Image (cartoon, coloured by chain):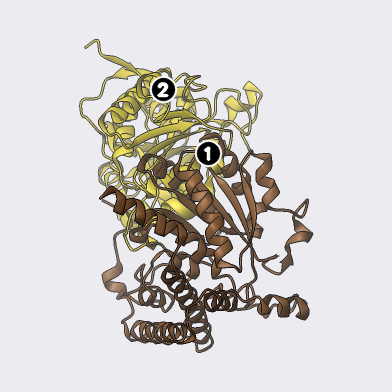
Chain colours: A brown, B yellow
Amino acid sequence: MSARKAETVEAGRAATGRDLLDAYARMLTIREFEQSIHRLFLRGEVHGTTHLSAGQEAVPVGVCMALEPSDYVSGTYRGHGHALAKGTDPEALAAEMLGRASGVCGGRAGSMNVVDLEHGLVGCFGIVGGSIAAATGAALSAKRQGRVSVAFFGDGAVNQAYFHECLNFAKVMDLPAIFVCENNFYGEFTPMRSVTAGGEIAARAGAYGIPFAVVDGNDIWAVRDAATEAVDRARSGSGPTLLECQTYRHFGHSKSDPAKYRPADEVESWVARDPLTIARERLLADGTSEDEIAAVEAQTRERLAEAVDAARAAPFPDPDAERAAGYSA
Amino acid sequence: MSSELEFRDAIREALAEELERDPTVVFFGEDVAAPGGVFAVTGGLQERFGPERVFDTPISELALAGAAFGAAATGLRPVIEIMFGDFMGLPMDSLVNQAAKLWYVSKEQGSAPLVVRSAVGAGGRFGAMHSQIHGTWFQGIPGLKVVAPSSPADAKGLLKAAIRDENPVIFMEHKRLYSVKGPAPETEIVPLGKAAIVRVGGDLTIVSVAKGVRDALQAADTLAGDGLETEIVDVRSLRPLDVQTVMESVEKTNRVLAVEEGPRTGGWASGLLGIVAEEALHDLDDAWTVTTDDVPVPYSPSLEDALLPAAETIVESVRSRLGTGVETSA
C-alpha cells in the first residue's frame, strides 16, 4: 500500500501527460467562461461590472495543480479563474454571474465576491489586497490542519498595507502561505512601474526574508513547478513564498474599460504568447496527438456551453424567501 | 457573598474558560501574551495555553483582523485584541467587508466566528486618538454584533457568549471600568442582543451602555431625592439593539433619555430615539439625549471632564428638561 501511495505522490509531482491535458482543458474552460460572460454582459444579462481574466489562465490553473482539494485559496475581483481552477462548478459560477438562485452564492455575491468554501475558496475580494489578508488567516488554520493557503492578487495590491503587513505576519508566524502575485503590468489603467517604487515586485519579499521567484505566468509548466516548490516549503513547515507570475489580461480592467492606454505592439506581443497557445504547442511537442487535443477542446467547449445554457434557464432568487438570515445561529 | 470580581479579571476568566472549553479558540494581539496586555487583562494565558493558541503579533492591525477573518472562515474561533478602539479605523476592511459579509453573501456557506476586543472610552487623559468609542463606526454594519458590558458579571458572560457566537463580534471594554468590582455572574453566559433593566422606576427611562450605565445608576440615586423614580436600561449590545425592552420601559415611564459617550450626530443614542419615535410615538411625552459636543476628546483634565457625560451631567440634564429638582422647582 505504501509503495502505491509513494507512486501516486511521484506521479503527482511529475505530472503526467494526462494531467497536463486536464490542466489545458481547465484553462480552456476559464477562457470560454470569460468569453461567455463577456457576451452575456453585452447582452445585458450580466450586470454591474465584471473583471475578466482571459490571458491569465495559466496562473491559477498552474498553482492549483500543486494543491490538494482541501487546501485554501483566496482570490480577487478578477476571480472567475481562481474559482474555476480550485474546483467551483462552471454552471454554479455562471449562474452566480447571472444573479440566479442556483448560483454558487445564490446570486448574492455576483462577479466580484464569490465564496465556495466546499472547494476551499475562502472568497474573492472586491477590495484590492483583501485576498492577501484572508489567505494569511486561512494559513493560521491550515498550519494546524496540514494544509496550505494561497493568496492570488494583482500587481496593484503590492502597494497596499495588506501586502506588507501580511507578508511580515506570515513570515514571523511561519505560516504555510503562498502569495501569488498576478503581475499583469497594469493597476486598473495605470502602468505598474509608474506607481511601484523600485519597479520590482518579487524582490520586496526578500526584505521580509521570504523566498521568492519571478515566473513566466503564461507558461503553465513554469507556474506549476514554482508552485510545487512553494507548496512543498509551506507544507514542510518552512513558511511562506512569494511568486510573481508575469502575465497579461486580454480584456480591459473592467467592462467599462477598452484598455486604450496599452500600446498596440505590447498587446500583440502578449497575445502572441497566449498561455493556451503555449500549452497546446507544448502538449503536441511532448507527444499528445492533435486528435486527442481537438477532442478535449470540443468536449470542453460543449460542456461549458451546456453549463451556461443551464445557468441561463435557472430562476432568479425569490426576494420574499430571502428575508431574515442576517446572522448565523 | 464574598465572590467580588474585578472587571479585568472577568475578561481574563472568560478568555481562559473558553480557551479551556474549545480547542479551536485562539487569542492574539499586540503585547497580549508574554507582556499580558497594556491594561494587565490577559496575563498568564500564554503560559497556560501555549504559544500556538495565545501569541503576540506585530503592530499590524490590518494583518491581525485579516488573520482573524481567514482563520474564522476556515475552522478556528479567533479572539483578537485591537488595543485601543481608536485603532479600529485600520482593520475596518477585514471586519466590515470580509467578516461581516461572509454569512450573507456566501448564502450561508459559513460565517466568521471571531471577537475583536478593544479598550475604549475617555476620562484617562489619553487624548484624541486613544479615547474614542468605535461602537457607532460599526453599528450600521449588517452581520456584525457590537457589545459593551457595564459590569464585571456582564463582561464575563457577554465575552463568553461572544466567543461562542457564530458571527463576528466587536467587543468594547471601557477603560474606566477595568478596576470596577462587582458580583460574579450567576449564569454561564449572558446572551448577546438582550438588554437588562438594572434599576426599576416609573417616571423616566434612562438608556445607556458601559460606563454610562454606572453614571446613570449614580444619577438615579440623586434624582430619587427629587422624587423622580428612574428606570435604567443597559442595552449591552448596540447591534443587535434591543429596542423592545426600551419600548416596554417607555410604555411605563413615557419619558426616555439616552446617554452616550460620543457625539450626538450619528450616535447610537439619537438612532435609538428615532426608532422609539417611529414605533411608539404614542407612548412618548419626552425624549432626548445626553452626549458629547462635536469635538474630538481633548487632553487637558478640565477640558476632558467638561466634555464627558457623568452622573452630575445626567442629573442636571434631567432637572432642566423636566423642571424638577432643587434648582428648578418653584
Helix, strand, or loop for circle 1?
strand
Which residue is at the far top? B2
For the N terminus of chain B, give its image quadrant: top left
A121 w.r.t. A267: above or below = above
Q: Disc 2 marks which residue?
A: B46
Callout 1 crowding tier (Cα within 10 Å): few <14, some 14–19, many ≥20: many
Amino acid beneath label 2: Gln
Image coordinates for residue B204, horizontal then vertical, percent: 33, 37
- Taking the image as drawn, is residue A207 in sight? yes
B198 w.r.t. A301: above or below = above
**What residue is at 45 percent from the left and 32 percent from the top?**
B28
**What residue is at 32 percent from the left and 27 percent from the top?**
B14
A209 w.r.t. B313: above or below = below
For the C terminus of chain B, give its image quadrant: top left
- The chain to which mark 1 is attached is B
Q: Disc 1 marks which residue?
A: B262
Image coordinates for residue B171, horizontal then vertical, percent: 41, 37
> What separation in Å lies between label 2 and label 1 (alpha carbons)?
35 Å
Q: Looking at the image, which is closer to me, B281 or A126? A: A126
Q: How many labels does the image show?
A: 2
Amino acid beneath label 1: Gly
Image coordinates for residue B273, horizontal then vertical, percent: 41, 49
Q: Looking at the image, which is closer to me, A292 or A321? A: A292
Query: Are the residues under badges 2 and 1 in a single subunit?
Result: yes
Q: Looking at the image, which is closer to me, A102 or A223? A: A223
Helix, strand, or loop for circle 2?
helix
Instruction: Please state if B249 lies on the left or on the right of A147 as rendered.
Output: left
- The chain to which mark 2 is attached is B
Earlier-in-chain disc, 2 versus 1: 2
Instruction: Please state if B199 lies on the left or on the right of A302 as rendered.
Output: left
Callout 2 crowding tier (Cα within 10 Å): few <14, some 14–19, many ≥20: many
**What residue is at 41 percent from the left and 41 percent from the top?**
A143
